[in-house]
Amino acid sequence: MDTSTYKNIVSFLPPARTLMGPGPSDVHPRILAAMARPTIGHLDPAFVGMMEELKTLLRYAFQTENALTFPVSGPGSVGMETCFVNLVEPGDKIIVCRNGVFGGRMIENVRRCGGVAVVVEDVWGTAVDPGKVEEAFKVHSDTRILAFVHAETSTGAQSDVKTLVDIAHRYGALTIVDAVTSLGGTPLKIDAWDVDAVYSGSQKCLGCTPGLSPVSFGERVVDAIKHRKTPCQSWFMDLDLVLAYWNATQRTYHHTAPINPLYGLHEALVMLKEEGLENAWARHALNHRALKAGIEAMGLSFFVSESQRLPQLNAVTLPQDADDAEVRRRLLADYNLEIGAGLGDMAGKIWRIGLMGYSSREENVLLCLRALEETLAATGAQIKTGVAQAAAKGVYAVK
Ligand SMILES: *Cc1c(COP(=O)(O)O)cnc(C)c1O
């Protein structure tokens, strides 16, 4: 190989950004420091002890006593697949709710597992309609599982987990809930709401780096997996095999756990415990109210109606004369600020401003409002200037 192709490549030094998109969110220095600690073996007793604490902390975050609660080695998408490949067998009927991009991915998962997806559609930007789910169960009483997204990151809409789970259980079905964006940011109560299978992600409201997917499974799921007619088609995600690693006192090798990222998740969860889960929810709500005050003072509006809006993912409708790509380019170049573009059908229609985890703090809200205001004004969009920051500060003053 010609050495000139690589001789100028040196260590990568990322720019310092403020992350206010749909994830990853800003990672606290304490978490980055934890990840820089020495790598030890994944069967080392010290590491096994850390993993036990990690499972305990995850039960707190999920508000569950489920024994089967652990971080899958992979991003949220792997947590999603872990649920589907273990629970769906060929021919199974699954009701999947689609009110955004991630519901669509669930449908794809069902199909790839050989299942039959009955799709309940809702308009993007609205919550899943329990009435439609009930109707679907009446028509398809042989449904085995109901699957839906709690916090739709593609639109900023939040669905009512408890009501949907209750419907599924009345018809004897299990539930798979996507809580990737809700865990740690908005109330999520796995036991009180009787959720059967749930997956999340490390990089959203937990504020850790991407690449880990906390999951939790109740007794009904354990039972369903034990009674599978066919072996799980994925070797890596087969819970029977993974559990021999995560749950056993005498651990044997399954795969090499991502040691340092797990230190990071442990630290993120210690920080969540120190803050208190309810306080974390309240912080996400407060910063949302401050951002909202500023956004609305500028004359911009929210895409999702107030009662269904997620505090940690703010979908803001683009003003008519705004240049989507140019505004986001300038935010990054001039302010080191990343916000999210619209995904799928929402591309060019909304911006997604994340206030997740460590990104959910006053200085980020104020930076975002200032940067958006200056950039929109400079690119000729019709907004009200000079009022957004004061509106947000007004919310913090009365908190
Ligand atoms: C981010 C996200 C995922 C996927 O997580 P990755 O870590 O990107 O694989 C799944 N569902 C929802 C709702 C998400 O926001």
Image (cartoon, rainbow, N blue to C red):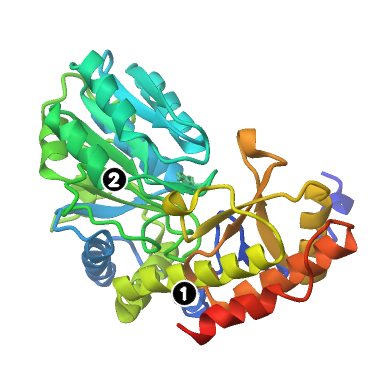
Q: Nearer the viewer, residue 294 or 5?
A: 294
**Secondary structure category for the residue under label 1:** helix
Amino acid under disc 2: Val
**Closer to the camera: disc 2 or disc 1?**
2
Location of residue 47 with respect to 62 vertically, above or below: below
Instruction: Identify which residue is drawn at 37% across, 51% down.
Output: 200
> Could one spot residue 386 in this view of the protein?
yes
Q: Nearer the viewer, residue 201 or 97?
A: 97
Residue 60, quarter of picture? bottom left
Can you identify the residue that label 2 sits on? 161
The amino acid type found where label 1 is placed reads Ile
Q: Is residue 24 above or below residue 120?
A: below
Q: Position of residue 176 (x, y in %)?
A: 28, 38
**For the view shown, which residue lies furthest in the bottom direction?**
397
The Cα–Cα distance between marks 2 and 1, rounded to whole angstroms, is: 30 Å
Percent coordinates x, y for residue 32 in the rendering = 51, 74
Residue tagged by mark 1?
31
Q: Residue sitting at 65 percent across and 64 percent down?
A: 295
Q: Residue at x 88, y 58 (%)?
A: 379
Quarter-of-image position of residue 202: bottom left
